[in-house]
Amino acid sequence: MSKIKKGYYYTNTHEWVKVEDGFAYIGISDYAQENLGEIVFVELPDEEMVIEAGSELGAIESVKAASDILSPITGTIVMVNDELEDNPELLNEDPYENWIVKVDMEDNSELSELLSPDEYEDICDE
Amino acid sequence: MFKYLPHTEREIKEMLQVIGVDNIDDLFHDVPKTLKDLDLDVPKAHSELEIFERFNHLANKNIPLTPFVGAGAYDHYTPTVIRHLIERQEFLTAYTPYQPEISQGTLQYIFEYQSIVTELTQMDVANASMYDGATATAEAMMMACKTKRRNKIFMSETVHPATIKVVQTYAKYRNITVTLIPEQDGVTDIEIFKELNDKDHAGIIVQSPNYYGNIEQLDGYRTLLDETKGLFIVNSDLATLSTLKPAGYYKADIAVGEAQSLGIPLWFGGPYIGYMATTKKLMRKMPGRICGVTEDVDGKRAYVLTLQAREQHIRREKANSNICSNQSLLALFVTIYSAIMGKKGIKEAQQKSFNATHYLAEELTQLDGFDYAFNQPFFKDVCLETPHDPQVLQKACEDKGFFAPLVIGEHNGKHRLLLSATEKRTKHDIDTLVATLEVA
């Protein structure tokens, strides 16, 4: 049973958003890392890049799959977690602590369209 | 043992029996009859002798000329041993076997080829998968646009026109806009690039030595591109990097170009080989494959296929390149050439070509009506201007057994000519050519 943390917003493509000090942090869920298996590479976007909700933010390669990270929200990337470049396995170790990008959100109301932990749990159980 | 034993009739029958098919034609029953019955008007079978005679007859129509033209394809010497090794049947195959258990030789020479490319370009990683310099440049463009998620790219007008055309063709079907940066006195006008540089373009492609043979000033691009987070793509004839400061020195992101100058004969225009090298940061964006060296279970050195952009297989619809093969046999040419010549030998051949071209240029510009087109340092091509009728010049050269000069256009009512001399051209050859052009 994978961990679903409270206080996070989720997508049905297994990304999460956490809002802190007005910024949105984006990462992947425990369910996502479990299913990907051993992660060997994280393709990160550039800082200052403008991303749209639903658009491709980057990609994750594991020993058994490669999949896109889709942005849950619209905004401008203000920081990228460079540590993942050399240590992609951090996403396996603690997917909720290791965010991928920090985003200056354009429209906070987008958050209401994301899934609550309970709603996300239903999706993972399906 | 001979690798390619054909099947015997008995074996074919046995195989057909196992899969329950009467004859080979039944395997193709999905192909419509109308396609099978095409009358292709193919001539009747010829004997070996007849074939030799026919092709000798065709080959004799060629007039062998001594080239004094480079423009991207150079008549350097190919040591005889290359041909002998290349034609060993373990190597001579269109297929590149990758299984490490049976292909240590192949994987080792691909690894060595990559090492040669990284050493010459001073980049971190290289593949062995580029068909030629032009398509390698197009691949670099696609790699840059994909990495930067931008659909525009700058390219200098001093890049070889054939390369420009190939890049534009690839760009068209990728919805990429290629913005050309004009030249100033035969080199890229960096001032114009400075003005146009923006965050919509994924970077710039510059060639040095460029189409005219001029050595571009490559300082300055890195700083400008850092401001817009663009990629710096440098196209060079790989062999010239033994002598000139390479892409890595200028902190380029991608180094590409033609490697024909490292041992591959002119061969009437091909096949040649392109190279591509990049930084560690971008290696996963690079098309093709990388061979690496590791240890087997017994701790012995072993060569393996180390990295291939996984999306080529797993996420094919998202792949950025359709390159999945290797220009392997040509890579072997380059590897053997480089091993035989060594660092010193490669450099010597290039320096001798530099000297020969400069001697030719100095002698020609002493003549009436031959002037340098540009006031720039050049390598093994030189661009001259003349008011003389270029067809008369070409005809006179042809009559003496020379292929020269290449006419590349007009400028201020004068014709622009490209000439080149490699280490194979003797002083006597050059003097004879100059005398021929003087009389014409």
Image (spheres, rainbow, N blue to C red):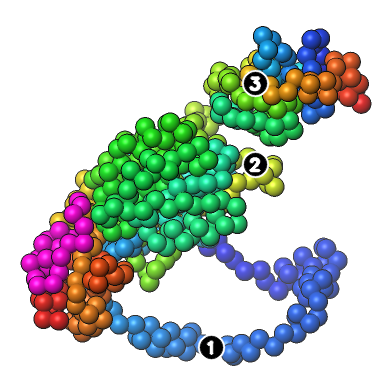
Q: Secondary structure at mark 1?
A: loop
Q: Determine the image quadrant of residue B353.
A: bottom left
Nearer to me, B19 or A81: A81
Nearer to me, B331 or B129: B129
Q: Locate residue B260, reporting x and y percent.
A: 36, 58
Q: Determine the image quadrant of residue A86.
A: top right
Mark sitting on residue B311: 2
Q: Chain of mark 2?
A: B
Residue pointed to by mark 1: B46
The quadrant of the rendering that contains the C terminus of chain B is: bottom left
Nearer to me, A120 or B321: A120
The answer to whether residue B431 shows anywhere in this view is: no
Q: Locate residue A76, reporting x and y percent.
A: 62, 25
Residue pointed to by mark 3: A103
Against B135, is B48 above or below?
below
Q: Locate residue B202, reporting x and y percent.
A: 50, 41
Question: Could you give the CA–CA distance between mark 2 and mark 3, rounded to whole angstroms?
Answer: 27 Å
Does residue B398 appear left or right of residue A123 in this picture? left
| Amino acid at the residue labelled 3 | Val
Q: Secondary structure at mark 3?
A: strand
